[in-house]
Image (cartoon, rainbow, N blue to C red):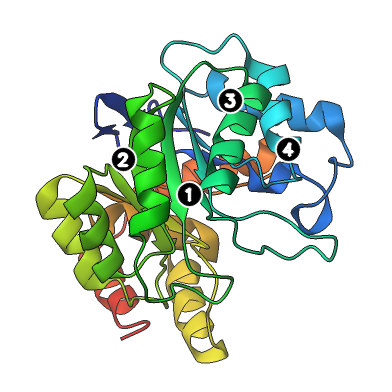
Amino acid sequence: MLPASLPGGTWTLGDLTVTRFGYGAMQLAGPWVMGPPADHDGALAVLREVVDLGITHIDTSDAYGPHVTNRLIREALHPYPESLHVVTKVGATRDQQGGWPPAREPENLRRAVHENLENLGLEALELVNLRLGNAEGPVPGSLAEPFQTLVELQQQGLIRHLGVSTATAEQVAEAQSIAPIVCVQNMYNLAYRQDDGLVDALAEQGIAYVPYFPLGGFSPLQSSALSTVAARLDATPMSVALAWLLRRSPNILLIPGTSSTTHLRENIAGAGLPLSDEDLADLDKIGR
């Protein structure tokens, strides 16, 4: 049974108020995030359920598919409810092998923004994250040129708010020296805690932190520790991992993905799982 309201309450991204429990659309595409979904109508049903359940934050990218998830979002939800906010990413494309080669040259970014606009059916994108790094994580180096390109598109009225993804703390600071950002989207979970300091620093500034892969990266020992807490609470490891993230810091926004309405409801219920001080103490030992 779902809670009366979504767990975690809301957060403000610039002038956008979103539910801290959001939805990531990546899994709506086909295998390896390539091609159409096996169940087209089922994908539309999940998106409509997202809105019906009160979620106001959908995370997507035109690279998913490519173009697949954005077109599904438009088909399912356009014209969008005023309360719904769609966040997208640019800075990577897809190759025929299913890889994610970077696409951060100015012409790549301009094309990506216009493709997002077209496929989502929008005149302006509410929030665009610049994807940096690669599949292994952040890569040090200046983001000035690609980020400045997005700032120019923002000044043209095509983007309202900016963020960065797969970024080092130094790149976050560099972006902030160029223009305000409202969120950082990086890999982070119970076991992968390299961004602990960044999470806290952003919280002090009122900037959101959006973790992806909330359950990924566990060793067998760490997975056993998580499973022990989950068993004590008669819950799934995913439920405990999501609930821990919401408790970790008030600026953390969740975007777990699924192609199932049943799993969507399970994720919401799991994120609202109450964690005791003992649970939190045991979980905080993971990844440290």
Nearer-N-terminus badge (1/2): 2
Residue 20 seen in the figure: no
- Please name whichever residue, 95 or 252, is drawn nearer the observer in this view of the structure: 95
Q: Residue 80 carries which label?
A: none
Quadrant for the C terminus in the image: bottom left
Which residue is drawn at the image coordinates 65% and 47% (left, top)? 26
In the image, residue 57 lies at what x, y percent? 45, 32
In the image, residue 12 lies at what x, y percent? 25, 32
Q: Distance between the residues labelled 2 and 4?
A: 31 Å
The mark lying in front, picked from 1 and 3, is 3
Q: Identify the residue at the far left of this view.
A: 204
Are the residues tagged 3 and 4 within 8 Å (C-beta)? no
Residue with the mark numbered 2:
8
Residue with the mark numbered 4:
67
Are the residues tagged 1 and 2 within 8 Å (C-beta)? no
In the image, residue 45 lies at what x, y percent? 73, 25
- Crowding at mark 3 (Cα within 10 Å: few <14, some 14-19, many 20+): some
- Crowding at mark 4 (Cα within 10 Å: few <14, some 14-19, many 20+): many
Nearer-N-terminus badge (2/4): 2
Q: Which mark is residue 117?
A: 3
Which residue is drawn at the image coordinates 73% and 28% (left, top)? 72
Q: Identify the residue at the far right of this view.
A: 38
Q: Distance between the residues labelled 3 and 4?
A: 11 Å
Nearer-N-terminus badge (3/4): 4
Residue with the mark numbered 1:
270
The amino acid type found where label 3 is placed reads Leu
- Please name whichever residue, 224 or 109, is drawn nearer the observer in this view of the structure: 109
The amino acid type found where label 2 is placed reads Gly
